[in-house]
Image (cartoon, rainbow, N blue to C red):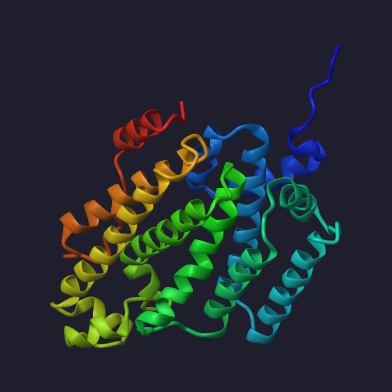
Amino acid sequence: MRIARPPLGADQSDLDAVEEIVRAAGTSFYQGMRVLPPDRRHAMYAIYAFCRIVDDIADEEGTLPEKRRQLEVWRQYIAGLYRGEAEGPVTRVLVIAAKQFALRLEDFIAVIDGMQMDAETVIVAPDFATLDLYCDRVAAAVGRLSVRAFGDSSPAADRVAHALGRALQLTNILRDLKEDADRGRLYLPREYLDDAAVPHDPAAALAHPALPRVCARLARVAQDHFRTAAAEMNHCDPRAMRPARLMGATYGAILTRLEQSGWKDPAERISLPKWQKLWLAFRYGLF
């Protein structure tokens, strides 16, 4: 009897450990990646696990020097991938995935740079250029890794990552206003706040009557990015773009619901009803 090769030719125990990190995160990402063939799916699980680990370093309690030290350790781990070195399940799977799907070192490092921005600074009312850089590092760089794992490394796929990453991150910012404010953070751009005379203090901003105007303005930027991403997907491998289309449709629907809410209650966390999630899953081939 022929024994099936584990995905990526990796050790099954490493694959299981990485998958458990993704499953334990409790997000829809785990189910969403089921549209991918096993090798690509497990590459994406490893990319997600890496992102989760460095994000936790930035977000969890700890001194800044310790966070810097841990992020520097991960810079060294990532550099080691390209020498065939690994130190645990996540990096052992990434060594294989990086080689098989031509994942770029600079994109991994950009993700760490984004997490370091969050670790070193309590981000409050950044100027738009800083916000865009942050979105590029924590979201678009992940997209640039992802499109390669999906199966398209073309310039058009990178343009999808550029636009869709920003669209997704801006949607998260607009959805998580209260959660971020509770941590002393406000990711809305300074220029938009000043134009509407909204204070930079996170708690005061959430209570200000002009906050919905600021949010609606940033939502229009996000919608432009969604439209750009959708247009660029037409120049990509259709099968490779299925997960990207699913993410775009899901977050686009969340953004629409946020716009409909008018940000009247920033503490209300907007999500999609189960029927809509299922409809999107069927439409984009999850089942």
Note whether residue 184 is visible: no
Total numbered labels: 0
The picture places residue 22, in percent across and down from the top left corner, at: 60, 47
- Is residue 197 rendered to the left or right of residue 284? left
The picture places residue 79, in percent across and down from the top left corner, at: 78, 67
Residue at horizontal 46%, vertical 25%? Answer: 287
Q: Nearer the viewer, residue 203 or 220?
A: 220
Note whether residue 286 is visible: yes
Q: Is residue 242 above or below residue 201?
A: above
Quarter of the rendering containing residue 105:
bottom right
Residue at horizontal 39%, vertical 72%? Answer: 180
Residue at horizontal 17%, vertical 88%? Answer: 197
Q: Is residue 88 above or below residue 16?
A: below
The picture places residue 247, in percent across and down from the top left corner, at: 42, 46
Q: Which residue is situated farthest in the left direction here?
A: 209
Residue at horizontal 60%, vertical 53%? Answer: 48
Quarter of the rendering containing residue 162:
bottom left
- Is residue 110 rendered to the left or right of residue 285? right
Q: Nearer the viewer, residue 210 or 128?
A: 128
Q: Is residue 229 above or below residue 33?
A: below
Q: Nearer the viewer, residue 132 or 90?
A: 132
Q: Which residue is situated farthest in the top direction here?
A: 1
Q: Is residue 237 above or below residue 168?
A: above
Q: The N terminus is located in which quarter?
A: top right
Quarter of the rendering containing residue 81:
bottom right
The picture places residue 127, in percent across and down from the top left corner, at: 36, 85
